[in-house]
């Protein structure tokens, strides 16, 4: 075939690839590229064929998809470009699929399992090729979906965390910019906390985890991670409070074994052996009920507790520390002086399912500049009947009231 015929073959092949025949088209064009018969002017079209082949490949064909990506990088195509960004989305999907395949394989066969490193991939793809569209979230049915950069960050950080290594400077800059481009949520703050932890910056990691929990306090693993960053003995009570928050979140007991084990270790650190023994008893019952092998940490903590120790339920003691966790989350936020300016009485309302609900008392408070804030006093343990004009101090996060105090307290 002469050049014009090859160019037409590849150009027509893009339409066939888009229609679902990408792997077949790729098989017919690849030999032309191998023997240097493919004109450079056709590299762009061939790159699209590779993209569609990646998209249409079976999820478990990790090696085949890796070869397709390697082929793409051998082409002379424009970067940055939408096409380059689309290749990135396929690499992220490959990383997720490779991790899923690895989880299905027994430990003794892991060395034979094909892996895909998104970290090494980005060394070839180059962060400098990110386009404005890669940062943009898409809306679907009124909900915003993660941007390509946010999906990349999740995959990239998961790999770094699995290997316990810090992020390179270019990625740290990307991660910090994510917090600025779109309104951050619990996931973004938690990921930034993990990066700071991997870099050895525990103080900044704690601050990001506190923000993550202020966004979403119903994620047990975040409370547990925050507790693990407070290893100093002077923080024993606070660690207990944070772990208790994780345990008190509704959910299957089967998923709380690791948290209870951390709690037992913390209690043993504080010489609360009877309470630690109770937690270990819960861990053992949980693991035996599910037919799981007890982790090595169990035996390690068990050895620190005298054999004749009688277990005592620590729940009453936990409840006395719970406020420590709530206070710790907001302690770094500035105090704002306000006064109660409106009282909205409780009222019945109909929810979206047609059920009658009691809407609780709400207060409006106003600061010196005239800005108004609303909150439900019952959430903060306040008497609902305090009079108009009552002086308060509040803490704000994301425009919402997250702390309320009747009398002045240290910030």
Image: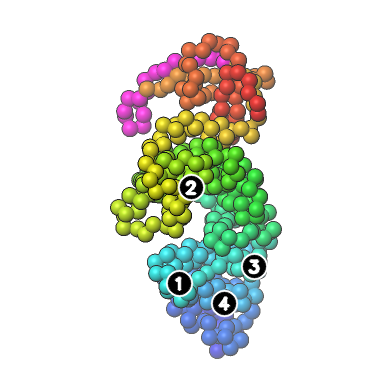
| Residue shown at the point (43%, 53%) measured from the top left | 298
Q: Which residue is mark 4?
A: 71
Separation of marks 1 and 4 at Cα, in angstroms? 26 Å
Q: Mark 3 Cα within 10 Å, few/some/many (few <14, many 20+)?
A: few
Say whether marks 1 and 4 touch (CB < 8 Å): no
**97 lies left or right of 233:** left
| Residue shown at the point (35%, 53%) measured from the top left | 287
Residue extent of the magenta highlight:
340-357
Pick whichever of labels 4 and 3 is earlier in the sequence.
Answer: 4
Viewer-side label of 2, 1: 2
Viewer-side label of 4, 3: 3
Separation of marks 4 and 3 at Cα, in angstroms? 16 Å
Q: Which residue is mark 2?
A: 265
> Quick one: 207 or 59, which is closer to the camera?
207
> Quick one: 167 or 174, which is closer to the camera?
167
Q: Which element carries disc 3, helix, strand or loop? A: helix
């Amino acid at each position: 075939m002469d050049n014009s015929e090859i160019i037409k073959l590849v150009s027509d092949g893009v339409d066939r690839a888009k229609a679902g025949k990408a792997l077949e088209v790729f098989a017919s064009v690849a030999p032309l590229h191998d023997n240097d018969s493919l004109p450079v002017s056709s590299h762009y079209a061939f790159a699209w064929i590779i993209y569609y082949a990646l998209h249409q490949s079976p999820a478990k064909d990790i090696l085949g998809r890796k070869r397709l990506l390697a082929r793409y990088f051998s082409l002379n195509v424009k970067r940055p470009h939408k096409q380059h960004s689309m290749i990135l989305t396929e690499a992220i999907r490959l990383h997720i699929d490779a991790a899923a395949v690895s989880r299905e394989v027994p430990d003794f066969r892991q060395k034979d399992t094909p892996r895909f490193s998104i970290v090494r991939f980005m060394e070839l793809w180059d962060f400098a090729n990110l386009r404005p569209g890669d940062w943009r979230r898409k809306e679907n049915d009124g909900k915003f979906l993660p941007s390509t950069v946010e999906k990349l960050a999740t995959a990239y950080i998961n790999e770094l965390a699995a290997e316990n290594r810090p992020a390179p400077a270019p990625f740290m800059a990307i991660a910090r910019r994510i917090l600025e481009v779109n309104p951050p949520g619990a996931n973004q703050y938690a990921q930034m906390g993990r990066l700071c932890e991997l870099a050895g910056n525990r103080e900044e990691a704690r601050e990001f985890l506190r923000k993550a929990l202020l966004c979403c306090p119903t994620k047990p693993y975040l409370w547990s991670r925050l507790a693990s960053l407070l290893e100093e003995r002077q923080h024993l009570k606070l660690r207990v409070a944070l772990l208790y928050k994780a345990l008190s979140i509704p959910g299957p007991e089967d998923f709380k074994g690791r948290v209870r084990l951390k709690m037992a270790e913390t209690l043993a650190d504080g010489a609360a052996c009877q309470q630690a023994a109770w937690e270990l008893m819960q861990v053992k019952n949980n693991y035996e009920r599910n037919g799981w092998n007890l982790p090595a940490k169990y035996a390690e903590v068990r050895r620190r507790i005298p054999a004749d120790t009688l277990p005592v339920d620590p729940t009453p003691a936990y409840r006395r520390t719970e406020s420590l966790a709530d206070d710790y989350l907001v302690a770094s936020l500035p105090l704002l002086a306000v006064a109660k300016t409106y009282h909205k009485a409780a009222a019945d309302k109909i929810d979206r399912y047609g059920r009658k609900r009691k809407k609780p008392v709400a207060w409006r408070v106003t600061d010196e500049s005239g800005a108004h804030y609303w909150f439900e006093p019952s959430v903060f343990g306040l008497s609902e009947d305090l009079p108009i004009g009552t002086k308060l101090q509040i803490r704000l996060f994301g425009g919402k009231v997250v702390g309320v105090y009747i009398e002045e307290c240290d910030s």
